[in-house]
Image (tube, rainbow, N blue to C red):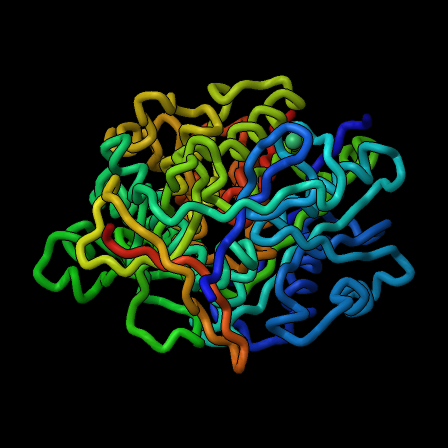
Amino acid sequence: MRPVYVIGIGITSFTRLEYPLSEIAAYPAMMAMKDAGWKEIDHLYVANMGSGRVNHQTGLASAVVDTLSLTPAGAEVIENGPASGASAIKTGLMAVASGLHDVVMVTGAERMREVNNLEATEFIATLTHPLAEYIYGVTLPSLAAMFTRLYMEKYGVTERHLAMVAVKNQNNALLNEFAHLQQEISIEGILDSPEAMTNNPYVAEPLRFFDCCPVSDGGACVILASEEVARKVERPLVRLAGVGQATDTHAVHEREEPTDLLAVRRAAAKSFGMAGLTPSDVDVAELHDAFTILEIVESEEVGFFPKGEGEGHLALERGETAVGGKLPINPSGGLKGRGHPVGATGVAQAHEIVHQLRGEAGERQVNDAKVGFTCNFGGFGNNVVCLTFVREN
Amino acid sequence: MSREIYAYKCRKCGHLHYPYRMVCRNCGENEHNEFDQVPLPKRGKLLTWTRAYSLPADFEVPSLGLGIVELENGIRITGQLRVDDPKIGMDVRGEVEIVRREGYDERYGMIFYEA
Ligand SMILES: [Zn+2]
């Protein structure tokens, strides 16, 4: 396989966007071409989950490739639920690594605010098992809540730990001009004060409002290229060194050990294996914190902290995962602070890592970051894609 | 008529599945429909639970109890939970009842009560 590099990146604000879905996909693509100083694109992958259902638009990639006047380049949509973004990047890597294409654009986009929050929750709930989960009214927050309760019981994670993730990530987002949530929060405000229970009601016990990511519109793009092209482009050399993907049972109740996220563990191991690196090599990570518990558990499953003792929440307590800590997690604000336009999220995670490895992340820059990692979590952990990036020069 | 929810027993190796899948997760040897339907037991222990407040629009209730139950034969099932003060590990019993109405469609599933 040929080595594959990220030569350009672009992103929209993650918020409510008033322009059409195809433009939410195209705008970051234009920024990425400008960033790379390169406009010859062989192929386009669009990561999206809901265009048909939420926006009543199908064949999105054909719309986007024409909006960008990139025809007759090939184009298609990659749909893998909330892991669509990293799946599309993985597919782009395969196209360049195989030699089929030299330059592939991967743009992720979602326009979820077209519907109200309940309809958005319902749309995401269609990820669940139709007969064994969906018919009961099971949603992603309720699956996450049942998982959280078990994790608390087994490992001593408390609502305070969950709130610490929310505060860390939402306050990281204040340093990210593209992040959805621009509101400073504190443990006092969301947990300890007399108003906290009003400010922060239960969504699905024991998860509260501030444990859940917002519903966002947004788009992000990365352009992948061969080494030959990457050396012509005058940008820092960031290599997509590892991709790994794993699946797990569709119905959550079938998993042998209900507090494990085996697909995360396996996808991460494959990604590190391909890169020839280990979790201890990572300087900065973007993990899929759609719910606060997930950042803690993924930080263990990918191998940053030992799972046996439930070390993830203890590392959080010690501040190791803050910007300036030993291993900053979600400096961008994560899904919690940046927002979660489902199809765009995996690409936005990669965008942040490339930004960090280039040393261009401004006030939230992680010092001397050379190796970055992303975990994009689809369904409730039934389809997970992990990426490993390395700064080369 | 009493309604049942079924587990699916592989005719090649005996492994029990819930929900249905087309190929055995244990032996991978059976072909389509080489499963025997086995009614799920109704009693078990509550493995975990939640009370959810942000519900799909067709649920016209302010909140909904949901749980995962480990049944007497070791099979786990997700269902609705109608228990005032749920506790992990408590004994529950299930009834097959209407769990969701979508237009004129009535969907049946397991609802768990305190045993
Ligand atoms: Zn079998």
Residue at position x 64%, y 45% from top? B21
In-image side of A285 versus B93 (left or right): right
- Asked which quadrant contains residue A298, the reply is top left
Let me know if residue A209 appears in the view. Answer: no
Q: Position of residue A358 (x, y in %)?
A: 57, 36
Residue A186 rendering spot, x and y as whole percentages: 21, 52
Q: Quadrant of the C terminus of chain A?
A: top right
Ligand 1 falls in quadrant: top right
Task: Out of A82 and A14, give the one closest to the viewer.
Answer: A82
Q: Nearer the viewer, residue A232 or A381?
A: A381
Residue at 36%, 36% (x, y): give it: A296
Q: Is residue A365 visible?
A: yes
Residue A257 is situated, as x and y percent measured from the top left of the image, at 43, 31
Q: Is A121 on the left or on the right of A164, as rendered?
A: right
Residue in the picture at 45% in, 29% down: A301
Give the vertical position of A13 relative to B8 (above or below).
below
Name the image quarter holding residue A309.
top left
Give above or below for A61 relative to B46.
below
Report the front residue among A69 and B28.
B28
x and y percent of residue A145 in the render?
34, 50
**Quarter holding the N terminus of chain A?**
top right
In this view, A269 is above or below A233: above
**Residue A241 occupies quadrant:** top right
- The residue sitting at the left extreme is A194
Q: What residue occupies the far front of the structure in this picture?
A: B1
Answer with left or right where residue A382 lies relative to residue A297: right
Residue at the spot x=55%, y=54% of the render? A129
The count of marks equals 0
User: In the figure, is residue A137 to the left or right of A149?
Assistant: right
Comparing A28 with A57, the one in front is A57
Task: Check the image and name the residue furthest to the bottom.
Answer: B104
